[in-house]
Amino acid sequence: MSSVLRRLHGVFTGRPRLPRVDLGKQCDLGQLVAKFKQLSESGEFRRRRVLYEKTVRRLARHRQFALIEDLLEDQKQYVGSSSDKFAVRLISLYGKAGMFEHAQKLFDEMPSLKRDRSPLHLNALLAACIFAKKLDKVDEIFRLLPEKLSLDVDVCTYNTVIKGYCRMGALDPALSLLDEMEKMGMGPDLITLNTLLEAFHGNGRFLEGEKIWDVMASNKFNPSIRSYNTRIRGLISQNRVADAVKLFDEMRDKGVKADTYSFNAFIVGCCRNIDLMGAKNWYRQLVESGCVVDRVTISALVPFLCEKGDFELAHRLCIKAMDKKLFLGTDTLQYVVDFLVRESKVELAKGIVEHGKAQKKPYDLELPQAE
């Protein structure tokens, strides 16, 4: 954006546009935190939620939990002067870093930080349980804190608790919360039902999954692409492919656009059922629809294509995967290279090896001797 456009942006939004801050160039993580703390003295900087997310994620990736604590403890001074969402962000960041005890400590300290606790903060704390995999805390917090602190619960609260129960495998207690919600005078929303639908289908309890689908219909919800994809995967896992195709057509007729996950469900199913033509047909539709080929597409198709003798397409997909920086483990690529050599497709194998070496982060591939 030019300097003129930046000034116009400031005129129309009521505040100047901050210059771009690239903390990613800071290699020393200690200095990164020091710079972050300095920049966060600005209220404009503190509105940059994505920068907070990226920085904490980077520190967590390097297991620098002391630095995360240093950074986020410093942010507590702004809790009282910022909106409710700022405290929500800090609680969530502690949860995403796997530091649930710190998230709970912040929640407990909020009155002393001159910020009243609200249902938003309760929901953030429950979500932090799930992020940090402290699933045993979900029920305890849900059953004790709202009454103790006189906090109302809402649909988001129930959705988070249902998600926690489902992660624990407690599907029946999760389902029973629908009745509890009704008694509280609130009905489920699409997020509630999608969470339950995924859990029941994912655990092979397809009959209950179909009942959840019926609840969607009876409550006049419009199933989302997430809903359709979940049910399509469930039908395919039961080898009800014709029903899955029918549902896919129904979805498109209702104006819900298929995505990569939709096509991948069929591609994976065809590979498992050793249906080469079906897998290639769904891959073709994926490409023609403009959807993105992802890791699932590649990891399902490439070995299957090799085994079924479609070496040219397997080769093209390997090249595409490397160009798009898709994660293809060296083992998978080496498998393809070895397979091609065994089938006397040495030039194709050589093409993958050379392309891998030309990447910015080269793949450690070797061309074996043909047998």
Image (cartoon, rainbow, N blue to C red):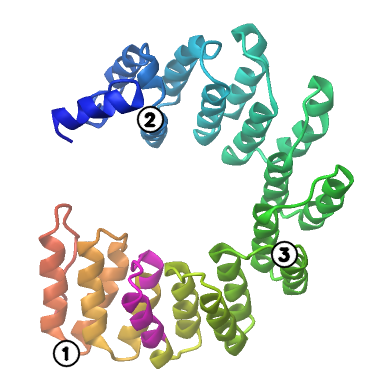
The image shows residue 19 at horizontal and vertical percentages of 23, 24
Q: Name the residue under label 1.
A: 344
Q: Residue 220 carries which label?
A: 3
The image shows residue 18 at horizontal and vertical percentages of 27, 23
Amino acid tagged 3: Lys
Given residues 288 and 108, the one toward you in this image is 288
- Where 270 falls versus 207 (above or below)? below
* Mark 3 Cα shell of 10 Å, populated few (<14), some (14-19), many (≥20): few
> Quarter-wise, where is residue 22 in the image?
top left
- Magenta residues span 279-297
Amino acid tagged 2: Leu
The local secondary structure at tag 3 comes to: loop
Q: Which mark is residue 59?
A: 2
Q: Which residue is drawn at 16% across and 72% down?
A: 352
Quarter containing the N terminus: top left
Residue 17 visible in the current orientation: no
